[in-house]
Image (tube, grey):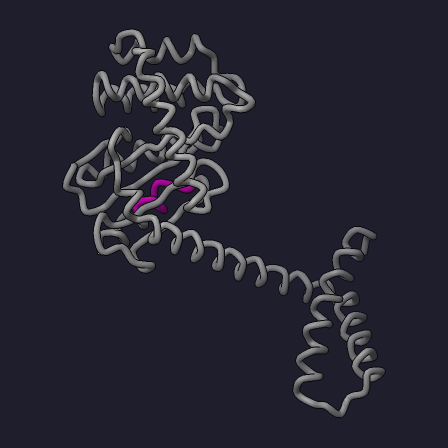
Amino acid sequence: MNNRFKAAALLLASSFSSVSMNVIAAQSAEFTPAQQARIGEIASDYLVAHPEVLIEVSKKLQVRQATMTARALTLAALHQHRLLMQLDGVPVKGAADSKVIVTEFFDYECIACSMMAPAMEQVIANNPAVRFAFRDWTIFAGRYPESTQASHRGLDIWRQKGADAYMAYHNGIYRTGHNEGKLTAGDIEKVATETGSGPENVNKRTQSDSLIEGNDTLADLLGLTGTPGIIVMPAENATVENTTVIPGVVTAAVMQQAIDKAKQ
């Protein structure tokens, strides 16, 4: 066993044996402090000698933590359902009377969002009755000004030309393959021009900034920690059972399962 693994094993063993010792002490008041300490030593020695036990415990802890995190995100989405359904100014695609709303928080500089884009495009094509909302969350703007620039241009295209032009721009930016600081002003204008849009109305940037700021506040209320952050839920009567929060990249099949669950 190398030193790093041994140290990690000792740390987990210490936590595990401490819990075990507390349980044993609670079950019987007959153990002396010395006996309890010895029980802890035996448990610790056993776990260090059998690292497979530690690995199994670690896996179970990870699964439990993931389950708890997913539930917390779902509860937060339910709590903010009203705000998620307020779509004034937010680019959307799909039926206005849809019973299911899919919301994506994204950044044009995000490589994970770029990886997610083809799956989202496929899911949108397969679900014309579902409404998809795209919330600009420019978390990379502090490092890459093109993050905000791309969002300003996209939101202006939405206001000028509507859903089809916006989706062409949105997917076109990701198809450049430029992200994490590689997206340029030239890329943005080239894709915008290809949608048939005119020059950006810069007088509307304050409106765009207000929307982006609202998205940032909502993402914080939802407990999202990065992009993409996707929420799939019914427009009405949302519950823990029919709401899914996806904090990261998934396949189109996983997205479809979440949509089908929201329809139930």
Give the side of residue 180 with respect to residue 259, left or right: right
Q: Which is more toward the observer, 174 or 92?
A: 92
The boundaries of the magenta stretch are 250-256
Question: Hey, which quadrant is residue 229 in on the image?
Answer: top left
Image position, residue 214 (x, y; %): 37, 34
Image position, residue 15 (x, y; %): 71, 66
Residue 253 part of the magenta segment: yes
Give the side of residue 166 with respect to residue 221, left or right: left
Q: Quadrant of the C terminus?
A: bottom left
Question: Hey, which quadrant is residue 46 in on the image?
Answer: bottom right
Q: Residue at x 42, y 17 (%)?
A: 149
Give the side of residue 93 with respect to residue 189, left or right: left
Magenta: main secondary structure: helix
Q: Is residue 3 above or below residue 130?
A: below
Q: Is residue 146 above or below residue 99?
A: above
Q: Residue at x 51, y 55 (%)?
A: 66
Image position, residue 131 (x, y; %): 23, 38
Question: Hey, which quadrant is residue 176 in on the image?
Answer: top left
